[in-house]
Structure formats: structure tokens, C-alpha cells
Amino acid sequence: MKTRFTSATPILFIVLLPALVTAAESDAGSDGKFSRSLSPESLGLKREKLTHLHFYFHDIVTAQKDQNKSTAKVAGAATGNGNSSLLTFGNVVVMDNALTATPDFTSKLVGRAQGIYASVSQSETSFLLVLNFVFTQGKLNGSTLSVLGSDPILSSVREMPIVGGSGVFRFSRGYALARTYSFDLVSLNAIVGYDVFVLHY
Ligand SMILES: *[C@@H]1O[C@H](CO)[C@@H](O)[C@H](O)[C@H]1NC(C)=O
Ligand SMILES: *[C@@H]1O[C@H](CO)[C@@H](O)[C@H](O)[C@H]1NC(C)=O
Ligand SMILES: *[C@@H]1O[C@H](CO)[C@@H](O)[C@H](O)[C@H]1NC(C)=O
């Protein structure tokens, strides 16, 4: 995974942020006030940075000899044709998918994609994707990014909004570009490359 900052990064700030509760945060509410104005500086917010993340997402629908299933179908519409394909309109799947540095499943694990996808289009194969990227490596360990997007899986590039984040990614916004690297029509297992661009402090 590649992280790039547009400006010199205040190292201490990044390292401490996930664990740090600022004075402004710990004082909140102690004076009985429901709402108040704060300066961004009081939360340690300085210059906004742009970070690019690149990783691969492994959607394991059918277990393989070296890979456990990482998805579970939890609901489906009564379509009447007995079609249990995850692609069928109305199906809802929960995932805990590995995110790795390269398309190789055994390459460095950088985090997990934890969330839900639901087949939501009656005219094409398209999912509603609601997930958190939960990062587990280096300075991103414990930080998350939240995605809420439309994923028409047969399109070569799908763009999905990043609607927020936590830890290093507090106050983040941005977008993810998803490109299918491989998709097996029999197992339905897929590897998807993600390029994520986020603005955050
Ligand atoms: C699959 O799950 C089993 C049981 O939890 C575990 O022992 C095994 O290491 C897992 N395999 C992989 C490749 O993660
Ligand atoms: C099941 O649904 C999928 C997606 O709509 C479709 O591609 C597949 O052909 C269907 N299979 C059967 C047996 O109807
Ligand atoms: C990530 O953070 C967790 C919880 O603090 C810790 O147990 C784990 O060892 C960390 N992982 C890495 C790779 O730093």
C-alpha cells in the first residue's frame, strides 16, 4: 500500500492522533452547553492532505484449498426460479474481505473490507456497497474509511464515494475507483483493485 502526503507530514500528530483525545474533546459538555463553536486548531486540524491508497480486495464466495470463504449470503428475494446466485436481484451478502498489497492473496495484508453488498438493479448486475475499509498496517493501523457506493460490477471502472473515516482519516472525503482484476464465473470469487483518493487532515 502506498500512502503519499502532499505536504511535509507532522509525524507526531499522525502517530498520536488515533489515541489522542484533545483538551477540546475531553472538555465537551462539561459546561452544560449543548452546542458551541470551536476553532479547527483546537482539534489539531491544520492543513488538509491528499492521500492515495492502492490495494486489492478479495471477495471469496466459494472456499478454495488455500482460502476460506469471506462472504455470507444473509438474505434473498423469493425469485421463484431457485436461483441462489449472489448476483440475483434482492440478495444481500455480508463480507469480511482481505485487502492485500498486490493481487496475490498471500501478499501483505493491509486491512479488511467489512460490510454489506446487495444486488439492487433489475436491469444490470449492480450492487449497493456499504462497507468500512479497516486498515491494520503501520500508521494506518486502526484507521477506517467508509464507502457508500453503487457498484455495477461489469463496468471496467466503478467510482464510489468515500463518505468519511476515523483515526488518521477523521474528516475525510474522497472517492474510490474499483477495477476488477479477476472474476471466476464458476466460484464467483473476485479480486478487485482499488485506488482510493482521500482528503483528510
Ligand atoms: C481457514 O479457517 C481455518 C479454521 O478457522 C483455519 O485453521 C485456517 O488457517 C484458515 N485458512 C486460511 C487460508 O486462512
Ligand atoms: C442466476 O442469476 C444470474 C444473475 O442474474 C444469472 O447470470 C444466471 O444465469 C442465473 N442462473 C440460473 C440457473 O437461472
Ligand atoms: C495494530 O494495532 C493493534 C491494536 O493496537 C495491535 O494489536 C497490532 O499489533 C497492530 N498491528 C500492527 C501491524 O502494527
Image: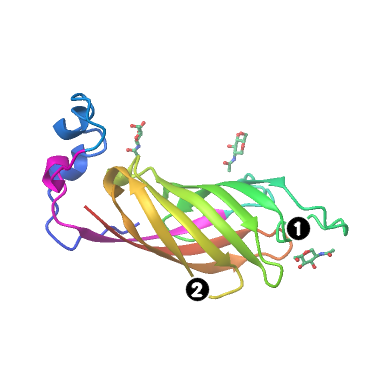
Q: Which residue is mark 1?
A: 85
The quadrant where residue 200 appears: bottom left
Q: Is residue 53 above or below residue 18?
A: below
Residues 136 and 133: in front is: 133
Instruction: Tell me the CA gap for discs 2 and 1.
Output: 23 Å
Is residue 106 at least partly visible in the picture?
no
Q: Is residue 183 left or right of residue 77?
A: left
Q: Which mark is residue 157?
A: 2
Mark 1 within 8 Å of ligand 2, using the beta carbon: yes
Locate residue 129, reporting x and y percent.
Answer: 55, 56
Locate residue 201, reporting x and y percent.
Answer: 21, 52
Residue at image point 38% right, 42% down: 136
Q: Is residue 71 magenta?
A: no
Locate residue 113, reporting x and y percent.
Answer: 49, 49
Is residue 62 at least partly visible in the picture?
yes
Residues 135 and 36: in front is: 36
Q: Which mark is residue 124?
A: none
Q: Earlier in the sequence, mark 2 or mark 1?
A: 1
Magenta region: 36-58
Residues 41 and 186: in front is: 41
- Type of amino acid at the residue the image marks with label 1: Ser
